[in-house]
Image (cartoon, rainbow, N blue to C red):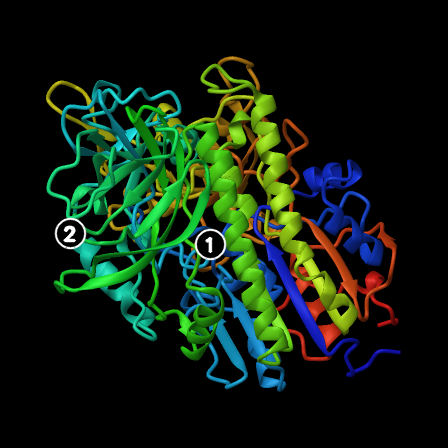
Amino acid sequence: MLRNKGLSEKVLLLGIDGMDPRFSRKMVDEGKMPNLQKFLKKGAARKDLRLLGAVPTITPPMWTTLATGAYPMTHGIEDFNINLKGELEVNFGGIYSTNCHAEQLWNITAEAGKKTLVWHWPGASWPPSSDNPNLMVVDGTSPGALGFCYASRDTEYIACASTKATEAKFYLYGSRSTEHFSGDAAELSETPIPFAYTDIPKKDYFDELWNQFKEGLAVNGYQPKKYMDMRTAMLMPGHAVQNGLKKWQFSVSLSPVTEPEGWANAPQDAKEFTLFQFYGHMSKPCLMLSNEQGHYDRVAIYSDKQSAEPIVILEHDVYTTNVPDVVPKGNTGELENVVRNMRLLDIAADGSFVRIWISNAFSADDNCVWYPHWIFDKIKERFGPPVPTGQISGGDMAVLRKCNIEQWRQAAKWQADAINYMIHEEDTEVVFSHFHGPDLSGHCYMPYLKNREDSPHPEEDFYQLHEETYRMTDEYIGEFLPLLDEGWSILIFSDHSLVCREGDSHDIGDNYGINTGVMQELGYTVLKKDDAGNLLPEIDWAHTRAVQQRSNSIFINLKGRDRFGIVDPADKYALEEQIITDLYRYTDAKTGHRIVSLALHQKDANLLGLGGDYTSGDIIFFIHDDYVFDHGEALSTATGHADTSVGPIFAAAGTGIKEGFEMTLFPREVDIAPTAAVLLGVRIPAQCEGAPIYTILSEEL
């Protein structure tokens, strides 16, 4: 019988954000995820691969649950952002360990003498919450790829040059797609709206709150980013950030094509154009180069016209990695080393047009979220700095398939190499790891897995893209399969997945700010108006009884609690009842179906692990499967078009795990941490509300 001894000396928690059990099962059955198939044969999982997900189905709270075994009402991170009680206009990043009220398993393993690596875990890992020398923590400051927030220095964009262009100019968020762009500036936007929300007018107390929030996060030189960690955004009626991502406009650098002038050594027959960077504030001269047949097929990018050698030469349709560059370092007047990825997508044989994808620029030297710093130095020396990744969308199929997927494939290989190095060369015994590829890739195209009025391509094209996302993910899993023969136990899981809804989304449940659409229509949120009667992005708090913000929360504007409260506490419950009733009555105009699947008083939401004393709404609600953005505001049981779902995945294999075992019981997200603890023979986290998944263990518990 298993008592205090563990079943395994080494455990890898292989977390993959957004990995869908339903779609993965389909891919495995079709032979398209061979590494996952091998893993399943060696280990244990349900036939449907499901993990019974918690809520809300969004990154920071769920990764915190996975680390602590506690529900959000217990650990305190109840959404992507945290709500400050009494401050209904502003939210702050919920990802940080300073917001967590439950014990993380990695602190326990480190204190038990296990050399523990926490790799880019986007929930309660940064700043490190233990100073034990066995604990190593690398970038838990954002979802996305490692470096997505702290290392990002310049935007992802498309660079075009054309004989049709008359001036060199950088168009900030100037186009939804350059897939059919001819090079005429008239096709680009002069006055773009890059985001689907409007910032709330600045108020002095916002700055005061921000200064208080960031005080405890300046560890190792890291500073939170205000645009990422302070949400003062108001989602106006008719807009939604998540829903608008598929239409997201990205920036375009446009230049005329001319004959070379002023160059120290321009090759014969070369053609010149300018490439803008850093939001148009920096530029680099470029040359289109011809081959022996006189056809243009390459682009050389230079730091200046007097340089003897280019920074890089891009070959047509070749994905080019780790292109070195420099950008201004804040306001210091210094320059900072960065790296980019690039792809020369199109080049006319006669040199009349060129189109280049250019990735985000990531810092090549910033180690502020690598604890301790030596990890950064060793990883960079062997594998280079973190791989730049981004999120260009807009339905541009060439960019999505040739650039977006490839950047994630490169990031996955770099990450796998880095983790395997830490295991084999630095004697790491426990790894908590997170890979965000399926989530961020899926966000770029998920609604288009179903044909819609504005679909830029048939759904079959996007389905192939989705399959490629999962092939890339399978390659990542394959990098760790050899560990099974080295005595390791591996748990594969996700926090949630992404669903392609059958219907249209509604202006409620978007986690990026205050949702005004449905609540204004129902009469609970009131916006101010200008003299012409147009709505302003400012709430009329004197007449607003309730607001909806984040993924699932509705707050009553309560006297004595909230800054501008008008609702008497004696009337609170009755108002909640009225709002819940109205939510159930609210229907989709096309189908007549209700859009809300479940709405609960805070006390009743305790049944789902929400509604604690920290940041919960007064009402918790969930959107019906058919109207979900893609995840966040849905229950974890939601399913959709093209074999998609919102629930997370689970499978386990290796030492201490039954081989070829098909589970019938549902494992839960709160069960991951205690299962890993039992495998390692360490104590279970103090606030853990889950239990070991005893049916998969090779010994009785």
How far apart in space, not on screen, are marks 2 and 1 (Cα)? Answer: 36 Å
* Residue labelled with disc 1: 145
**Front in this rendered view, residue 198 or 170:** 170
Point out the image quarter for the C terminus. Answer: bottom right
Q: Can residue 82 be seen at all in this image of the molecule?
A: no
The answer to whether mark 2 and mark 1 are in CB contact below 8 A is: no
123 with respect to 662 (left or right): left
Q: Residue at x 29, y 57 (%)?
A: 225
How many labels sit on residues? 2
Does dot 1 land on a helix, a strand or a loop? Answer: loop
Residue at which label 2 appears:
306
Dot 2 falls on a residue whose secondary structure is loop
Q: Depth-wise, is mark 2 or mark 1 nearer the camera?
A: 2
Q: Where does residue 160 sit, x and y in percent of width and height?
A: 28, 31
Which residue is at a point 73% across and 65% down the rendered structure image? Answer: 482
Amino acid type of the residue that numbered disc 1 sits on in the rendered structure: Ala
Residue 516 coordinates in the image, percent (x, y): 34, 32
Q: Residue at x 33, y 67 (%)?
A: 366
Q: Is residue 373 above or below residue 416?
A: below
